[in-house]
Amino acid sequence: EAGVVQSPRYKIIEKKQPVAFWCNPISGHNTLYWYRQNLGQGPELLIRYENEEAVDDSQLPKDRFSAERLKGVDSTLKIQPAELGDSAVYLCASSFAGQIQETQYFGPGTRLLVL
Amino acid sequence: GENVEQHPSTLSVQEGDSAVIKCTYSDSASNYFPWYKQELGKGPQLIIDIRSNVGEKKDQRIAVTLNKTAKHFSLHITETQPEDSAVYFCAAKRTGNQFYFGTGTSLTVIP
């Protein structure tokens, strides 16, 4: 079974440029998470989807970040314009809500460097 | 919201010794506690988890214990090996809510 797929794996951009990250969750998983992980810290939730609906986006900086999950499968996270402080690893994870144990699986992440 | 604290932030052990990482949580409604291992350049990988109705769970050299009264849970790795070297994260969650992660423990196993 394929795991969570993310692309690109690495991205280097100049500040004020836009950037987009793509995630394909595990087949059948209805919940998708986007996290940001700064160096030496744990993942911090940006947005959580259940199917197509964003059920928790309270920590998404909406002035520059946007996300979508069309058809309840793939998802895209966009930053426009990027700032120096956005340099981090962006992790996507998926799970099947409804199980007694909501096991969450992570993708390899996208490492973003903003210059 | 939930607050998860993790200690220690770094841990070095000799190969073959045991390693223990501890986490505390604040939300008494949290009922699911996974542990993740993250190797350099990779995403976190689930290694063991425990639900609030269980006090201890083992999987070969790895075990997790949960004390609901004190609101803390621990990861125990016995007979450590160099390949156990990584960053370990604990997390806490209650049904229908998001995962809250600790700040991570960098474990180094010295051959």
Image: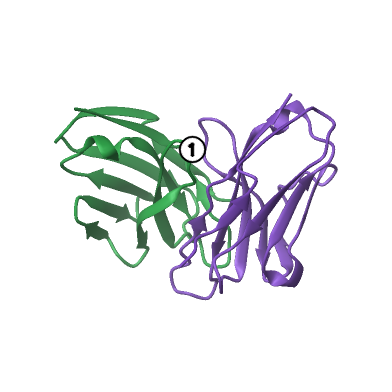
Q: Is residue A10 visible?
A: yes
Q: Residue furthest top?
A: A115
Q: Chain B drawn in what color?
A: green
Q: Residue at x 70, y 71 (%)?
A: A72
Q: On the rendered structure, is B14 left or right of B91?
A: left
Q: Quadrant of the N terminus of chain A?
A: bottom left
User: Looking at the picture, does residue B111 appear above or below residue A80?
Assistant: above
Q: Residue at x 37, y 63 (%)?
A: B52
Return the x and y of residue B39 as percentages of the image width and height. Answer: 41, 39
Q: Chain A drawn in what color?
A: purple
Q: Which of A1 and A38 lies nearest the eye of the viewer?
A: A1
The residue that disc 1 covers is: B41
Return the x and y of residue B111 as percentages of the image width and height. Answer: 19, 27
Return the x and y of residue B7 as percentages of the image width and height. Answer: 38, 34
For disc 1, the chain is B
Q: Is residue A57 visible?
A: no
Q: Which of B25 and A53 lies nearest the eye of the viewer?
A: A53
Q: Amino acid at mark 1?
A: Gly
Q: Residue at x 60, y 43 (%)?
A: A9
Instruction: Identify the coloring.
Output: by chain
